[in-house]
Image: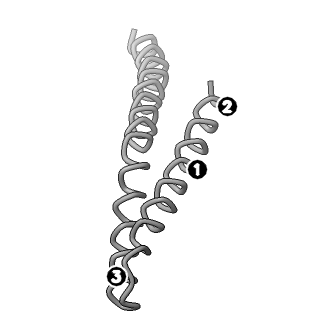
Amino acid sequence: MADDGAGNGGNGAGGGGKGALGELVKAESMIQLAIALPAGCVIGWLVGSWLDRHFHQGWIAIVGILLGAAAGFVQIFRTASRYIKRG
């Protein structure tokens, strides 16, 4: 009886642990998708604003936002393709 309980518990815990861990990994991937674009835009804007102040220009922040958005989209596509490959 102890063997059956350990065997079932081992399989259940292993499968359940893997399933729960798999669900957490999926949730983390979805959080990455939600954060990638805004974070890229904010980081691009901050770097662009600093460069604007450093070089006394007014357009570099806009370019930084656009580059940050592009980097965010690239990250979204990478994460999504990795998620799709896993199934």
Q: Which mark is residue 37?
A: none
Q: Which residue is mark 2?
A: 85
2 or 1: mark nearer the eye:
1
Disc 1 crowd rating (10 Å Cα; few below 14, some 14-19, many 20+) is: some
Q: Which mark is residue 74?
A: 1
The kind of residue tagged 3 is: Trp
Check the image and report above or below for 7 versus 34.
above
Residue 71 or residue 9, whichever sits in front = 71
Crowding at label 2, few (<14), some or many (≥20) Cα neighbours within 10 Å? few
Q: Is residue 1 above or below residue 50?
A: above
- Foreground disc of the pair 3, 2: 3
Element at badge 3?
helix
Inter-mark Cα distance, 3 to 2: 39 Å
Is 13 left, or right, of 67 in this rendering? left
Image position, residue 61 (x, y; %): 39, 71
Kind of residue at badge 1: Val
The quarter of the image holding the C terminus is top right
Task: Identify the mark nearer the N-term, 3 or 2.
Answer: 3
Image quadrant of residue 81?
top right
Where residue 50 is drawn, which disc sits there?
3
The location of residue 20, given as percent across then percent down, is: 40, 27
Crowding at label 3, few (<14), some or many (≥20) Cα neighbours within 10 Å? Answer: some
Q: Are marks 2 and 1 in contact (CB under 8 Å)?
A: no
Circles 3, 1 touching at the beta carbon (< 8 Å): no
Q: What's the residue at 59%, 42% (across, down)? A: 77
Q: Could you tell me how far apart the alpha carbons at marks 2 and 1 are, in whole angstroms?
A: 16 Å
- Closer to the camera, 48 or 21? 48
Name the kind of residue labelled 2 in the image: Lys
Residue 85 placement: quadrant: top right
